[in-house]
Amino acid sequence: MLNKKMEESMDILIQAYKTYGDGVVFLTSFSMEDNVITDLMSRAGTGIKHVTLDTGRLPQETYDIMEIISNRYGITPEIVFPRSEEVENMVRAHGINLFRSSPSLRELCCEVRKITPLNRILSHRRAWISGIRSEQTLSRKQSEMVEPDPMRPGIMKFNPLLNWNSDHVKEYTEKFMLPINALYSRGYRSIGCAPCSRAVLPHESERSGRWWWEDSIKECGIHAPVRFKPVLREDE
Ligand code: SF4
């Protein structure tokens, strides 16, 4: 089963590279999923460039795994930061922890620290690769392995792990002894910015530790619009 998944995902990665060459990039957060993709890309020999977003609020453990994976695969990810003046203006107006104040300020923080930098990266690219899986959220269930980016007209998006479940990711990680972010061993199942991610209990959904104080679809705006109540919960 895992071999079939690997073949299917590598075909998608090869297709992306053959179609777009340097016009396609892989956006990695060095999650378990993204590290699987990095490993698959190295097996497929695609040469697709890695980019990552440094929001300025990442956990130290994410910087550690970034370094470990970069060394293991001999890659130099392009690290993209938000514009300093945009962050300064936002913090001056709304405070350093604005994301806890209201849904719209959480959305603003993700916009400034994640979405605008990503859009800047993609403004001179034609396609990108993401590590989303369909079981993660309701909106991701509606995605396709190859699709026009629903958030960015004119850009294509490749989701090579869309049909993998968390057991497939775990099995692959163990089989090929991939390093993982140390926070997973402390109960985290989805890791984003430090103040907006926490460990979850075994019965909780994997993204329930993201922005745990809010009733939302658990998206930041990269893959789907940020939506708050009234919406279905991801586990309904
Ligand atoms: S995840 Fe939290 S800290 Fe990171 S950009 Fe979004 S609101 Fe800001």
Image (cartoon, grey):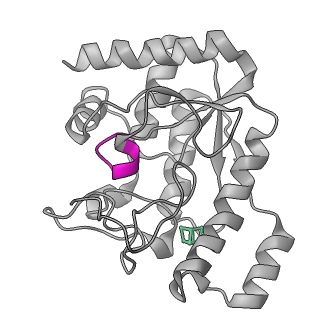
Q: Is residue 179 left or right of residue 12?
A: left
Where 74 sits versus 118, above or below?
above
Q: Is residue 137 visible?
A: no
Q: Residue sitting at 68 percent across and 32 percent down?
A: 155
Q: Nearer the viewer, residue 9 or 187?
A: 9
Residue interval drawn in magenta: 133-140
**Number of numbered tags placed on the structure image:** 0
Q: Residue furthest front?
A: 230
Whether residue 136 appears in magenta in the rendering, the answer is yes
Residue 229 in the image, given as x and y percentages of width and height: 40, 74
Q: Residue sitting at 65 percent across and 12 percent down?
A: 19
Q: Is residue 23 visible?
A: yes
Quadrant of the rendered structure where residue 209 is?
bottom left
Image quadrant in which the N terminus is located: top left
Q: Is residue 137 left or right of residue 28?
A: left
Image quadrant in which the C terminus is located: bottom left
Residue 96 in the image, given as x and y percentages of width and height: 65, 86
Q: Is residue 1 left or right of residue 61?
A: left
Q: Is residue 140 left or right of residue 87?
A: left
Q: Main secondary structure of the magenta part?
A: loop
